[in-house]
Image (cartoon, helix red, strand yellow):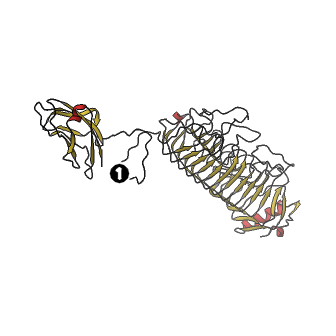
Amino acid sequence: MNVRDHGAVGDGATDDSGAIQDAIDAASDAGGGTVYLPPGNYACSSSLTPRSNVTLSGDAGSALHHTAVSAIIYGSAVAFTDFAVEGLTFLGPVDESPATPKRGRTASGPGAQTAVFLTGDLDTTGSGQARLTNFTMRDCAVRNMTALPIRIGGVRGKVSVTGCEFTNNQDAGFLFCEEVIFQGNHVRQSADNGVSLSRGNGKISCVGNTFENCAFNGIWVAGFLTDKGPANFTVTGNVVRDVGHNGIYVDYASKYGAITGNEIDCGLFRGPSDRPSDVNGAGIYLGGFPITDRGNPTDRAEGITVVGNHIRRAARAGVYLNGVRHVQVTGNQISDVGTAHLADGTTVIESGDLTQNIGILMENPVTSADVTVALNSVVDTRATPYTNQGLVPQSASAVNAHLNTVTGTRQAGNPLETGPTRTWQAAHHFNGDIRLNAHVIGGGTAVTVAAGAQSASAAAGSNGAKDNAGVINTTAAASPAAGTIARVTYATAYGAIPKVVLTARNAAAAAVGLYVTSESVAGFSVATAMVPGAGAALSFAYHVMG
């Protein structure tokens, strides 16, 4: 159905809102169909009302604008199922295009605040709304809106926004929807976040989008004011560049999500140019609830994996954690974090500062629990590095950090192993050199030590004796001969006969020529080649290698 057949002109001046609405209503009353807007600039003095089973469609050059301060499409009082828009350009009055993150914008006069504003019965910010079900927006462009380019709230079923461009607006916003799919979109020059996947949403998929030059956060997955964040989300394969606050912001105790495979280059901004900030500045930010008292959360961000992300040029921290539990930060590459000065441009950030310029920063660690930080790489490649440390804190009951690497930071601390002791339950095979930068400490159950025929007694030394190593103290018999002075039985038998190395620990033991005999998978004996003195104290150490 062509809107020109209903009287629409598309000359940019004639009010076409009545003609377009007539076409939408006629298509829906006929059971549904496509309402086509040929190329042209369609002026609307009143908002268009969505109807069931209608797709509002256009081609390159098909544009709509509003002559008043309002939404071009507004749905609330009239129920619908399956309303879609595709291939359309929506135009607003903003006439300033900042080259770097900035909140404030100027506008040429009255015009559209929002391209599509929907508020269904699930939206608790209002009352009396109709039941809205299934909304699709694809291959559209929204430019220069004074508020949110789209605001989709309380819609049942599936909300899908794909392949769209959002330029020089505020944030594309979603709240209290049953399911949101935001995929393959390009967001530029936002005066707020790139996208706000906010409170009350049931399922969220934010995949394969690009966000550039956003005043605040690239991707917001969080609550708002007194409402907690959403649950059940995936944020995967997005590109985020040049943001005033954080690349990906997951706060207000959002739960059960995956943040994986994103490319984040924050641009080292400490806030938008007209709202400086030293609190934000993270590549990925996870926090609990409420945000007004970070030291005393009443609820926590929970069940979240942060895996395989590339994070560059975050002003404060590559990954920031506060008030979280059951979180894994694994396999991320974090580079060139931190700036020389705070947001005021003059206060120097010292190399010993443990709240700024950190690869992975956990503030208020007592508010977090069961956090694994593993296999991450933190590097500062700059000629003058500003990253202070790879991980803060490096020792806390909340964090199990292991097998991370840190290169080029101001502080030399390397959080290779900072968590609690880990137990290997099976054999591990290494085909290269093993380089140890710390002590090797044996563990396990103690061996059994028995006196040999030429000893009055034999026992493990005070430092114990285990299957891999130990010390044995013996006392020679009153009338000794050369022969066995001790028998050591392993707590756990080896799979094959291991090698045993002996070391005499006193002169008497060295003088009698100790050697190993009766080796087996179960244990070994120690004998003397020469006759020890009567009642001589013979002490030796052993090391076993399987």
| Quadrant of res 468 | top left
The three-letter amino acid code for the residue at tag 1 is: Ala
**Farthest left residue?**
479
Q: How far from the left and from the top, in percent, is residue 403?
A: 48, 45
239 or 6, nearer to the observer:
239
Where does the N terminus fall, quadrant-wise? bottom right
Q: Nearer the viewer, residue 459 or 205?
A: 459
Kindly tell me whether residue 230 is visible in this rendering: no
Question: SS for tag 1?
Answer: loop
Is 151 left, or right, of 449 in this rendering? right
List the single residue furthest toward the right.
13
Does any portion of residue 479 appear in the rendered image? yes
**Could you say which quadrant of the image residue 529 lies in?**
top left
Residue drawn at 66 percent across, 36 percent down = 279
Residue 107 pos. (x, y %): 84, 48
**Which one is nearer the viewer's eye here, 480 or 95?**
480
How far from the left and from the top, in percent, is residue 25? Answer: 76, 64
Quarter location, residue 271: top right
Q: What residue lies at 71% left-to-right and 59% top-to-bottom?
A: 164
Give the answer, above or below, for where 386 lies relative to 425: above
> Which residue is located at x 73 percent, y 33 percent?
346
Judge from the rendering whether residue 62 lies leftward or rightward of residue 476; answer left or right.
right
Residue under pointer 1: 427
Q: How crowded is mark 1: few (under 14 residues within 10 Å), some or many (20 or more)?
A: few
Camera-nearest residue between 163 and 58: 163
Q: In this view, does 426 lie to the left or right of 65?
A: left
